[in-house]
Image: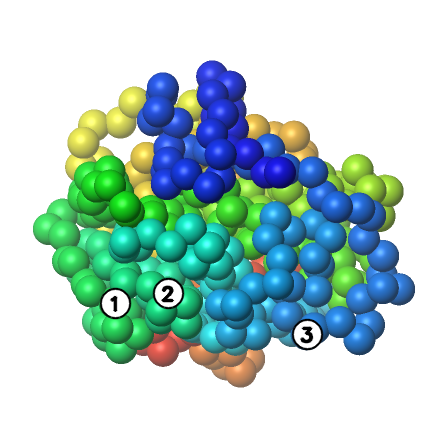
Amino acid sequence: MAMYLCPRDGTRARTTALTWCCPVCRGPWDLDFEIAGPLSLNALPGRVNSLWRYEEVLPLAAPATTLGEGRTPLVPLTGTVSAKLDFLMPTLSFKDRGAVMLAELARRLSPERVVADSSGNAGTAVAAYCARASLPCTVYVPEGTSPKKTEQIRAHGARLEIVPGDREATALAARTAADTPGTFYASHVYNPYFLHGTKTYVYEMWEDLGGRLPEAIAVPVGNGTLLLGAALATAELHAQGLIDRRPALIAVQAEAVSPLAAAFRADADELLDAPAGSAAPTLAEGIAIPRPPRARAVLAAVRESGGTFLTVTEDQIRTAQLDLAARGFYVETTGVACWAAVGGWTDRSVVVPLCGAGLKTGLAG
């Protein structure tokens, strides 16, 4: 049986408990989980055409909350750069991969309420899947969140709480609510089931490339949930003998809010001290996270893969969004960050995620 495990102090808890963080250090959980068995390419044809086809490596099975998420196309953009079109998910962002896991787990635990916090996309995904599971849901978002995202959250029937201040203030408000008895905190940061959903991004890539992976995988990083999911998948595939090398993980942040890139460049294992309010506004609202709780794990994953951190400016984000639109892809401003960072690479193969639809934010001003 899967168990929650604190990576800092070894504290454990049952996954049947509504315990959203380690009670000792208040840090995020990892999941102590063993995959059911080796995956085989030959076993996949004919299976359900969603991320649930990888049942051997998932901590949940036989979902009732699925919306058909996953199996997004992988499309070449240049001779070396390909894009995975995760903006074609049911709620128009990659966050569906993890949100379906959280909602399915919550459905089985039957809490009185579900709460989530988000800069937009995770909130819309949790709202949608909670609607599918008939669970009451409240989503906390920072003021200034895209009106299209808040409209989507409300449309799914969730209660919306708009928090004055930044993403950090929003997370604190949600965590306070999460401590209320009977509450399931559908946190894409603290709950590791989310990471086991995002890892399917790489399993799909591995399947579509015929049992191999590119030399590098670039992902936008705020809290780092897609990157950590990618690290899980590459480690599992390598351990199963299904790939002979693990690709480099290229983490991309907006220059305006880049605490992880700064720590990486300083060869630090943790975030550096930064004065309050030092983060500047950015078009990449989805990765504008000044103090990600899983910073240590993200930094370690990038280093272990032989990867690096890259940052992009606001002008680069604007240019990349228009460039992708000219190629036929209308992607939100956060979702173009990786294309802005590595779109010109010619020395190695790399996949970038187009992880949110342009309709969520509109064109950058």
Residue that numbered label 3 is attached to: 49
- What is the x, y in percent for residue 170? 21, 47
Residue that numbered label 1 is attached to: 158
Residue that numbered label 2 is attached to: 130
Q: Can the viewer see residue 286? A: yes
Left or right relative to 133: residue 228:
right
Quadrant in the rendering for residue 141: bottom left
Mark 2 vs mark 3, CA separation in Å: 22 Å
User: Residue visible at 26% across and 73% down?
Assistant: 157
- What is the x, y in percent for residue 238? 79, 41
Q: Residues within 10 Å of mark 2 (few under 14, many from 20)?
A: many
In the image, farthest residue toward the left: 164
User: Residue visible at 55% across and 34% down?
Assistant: 3
82 versus 314 height, above or below = below
Query: Is disc 2 placed on a helix, strand or loop?
Result: helix
User: Residue visible at 82% across and 42% down?
Assistant: 240
Mark 3 vs mark 1, CA separation in Å: 28 Å
Quadrant in the rendering for residue 365: bottom left
19 versus 335 height, above or below = above
Q: Residues within 10 Å of mark 3 (few under 14, many from 20)?
A: some
Query: Is disc 3 placed on a helix, strand or loop?
Result: loop
Q: Are marks 2 and 1 in contact (CB under 8 Å)?
A: yes
Q: Earlier in the sequence, mark 2 or mark 1?
A: 2
Amino acid at the residue labelled 1: Ala
Amino acid at the residue labelled 3: Asn
Quadrant in the rendering for residue 129: bottom left
In the image, farthest residue toward the right: 42
Q: Earlier in the sequence, mark 3 or mark 1?
A: 3
Amino acid at the residue labelled 2: Cys
Front position in the image: 364 or 133: 133
- What is the x, y in percent for residue 109? 42, 51
